[in-house]
Amino acid sequence: MSVPTEFDFALLKIGDGESPEVFTISCGKQDFTANFAANSTDRFVRDCAKPGEVPFRVPKVTGRQLDITATGLTDITAFGIEVALVGTKNNIKLEYYTDDGTDAGDLIGTVACNMLVSGLSIGAPRDGDASAEISLASSGAWTWTAA
């Protein structure tokens, strides 16, 4: 029987822009959505041999984008750093892991990209749990590197 190897968890790491670059885990973020998308415009092309027929759609790819949303817990240590990052572009790594019984897990692979930190939302309900969400938008090409 063949079954897929699934991701069990991920870590978001944000680069400091220095040389050599140091990547710091966005602590507390536990849930991740990475949306890889192709932007397109629709063109409708008629069959030259049958110009009276309704044309068929032929989408034209106009761009590609990656958007990452990371949600989870607030971390007072990271809060000031992440607030200052809003509106800036940084090198980002989203590392995917499987649980293997160790403290670190087993790295499956890494998505890397320069990304705009487009938003940081903090929820602090009086009678509930605080939460944080950081939104990232790709600025250029991304790479996937298998471990």
Image (tube, helix red, strand yellow):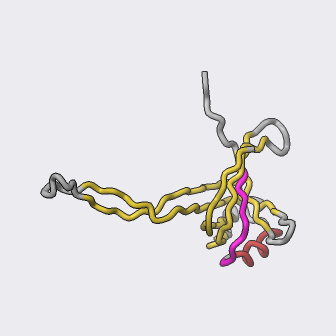
Viewed as shown, does residue 6 lie left or right of 28? left
Examine the rendered structure and indicate whether residue 6 appears above or below residue 124.
above
Viewed as shown, does residue 47 lie left or right of 113? left
User: Start and end of the magenta stretch?
Assistant: 87-96
Check residue 73 for magenta coloring: no
Please state the horizontal and vertical placement of residue 32, each as a whole percent of the image.
64, 55
Check residue 94 for magenta coloring: yes
Is residue 116 something that shows in the picture? Answer: yes
Residue toward you, 30 or 124: 30
**Quarter placement of the N terminus:** top right
Query: Which residue is located at x 42 percent, y 62 percent?
Result: 40
Is residue 125 something that shows in the picture? Answer: no
Viewed as shown, does residue 133 lie left or right of 107? left
Please state the horizontal and vertical placement of residue 56, each as a whole percent of the image.
26, 54
Please state the horizontal and vertical placement of residue 29, each as a whole percent of the image.
71, 58
Residue toward you, 1 or 46: 46
Query: Which residue is located at x 68 percent, y 76 percent?
Result: 86
Magenta stretch, main secondary structure, is: strand
Residue located farthest toward the left when viewing the structure as drawn:
52
Residue 3, image quadrant: top right
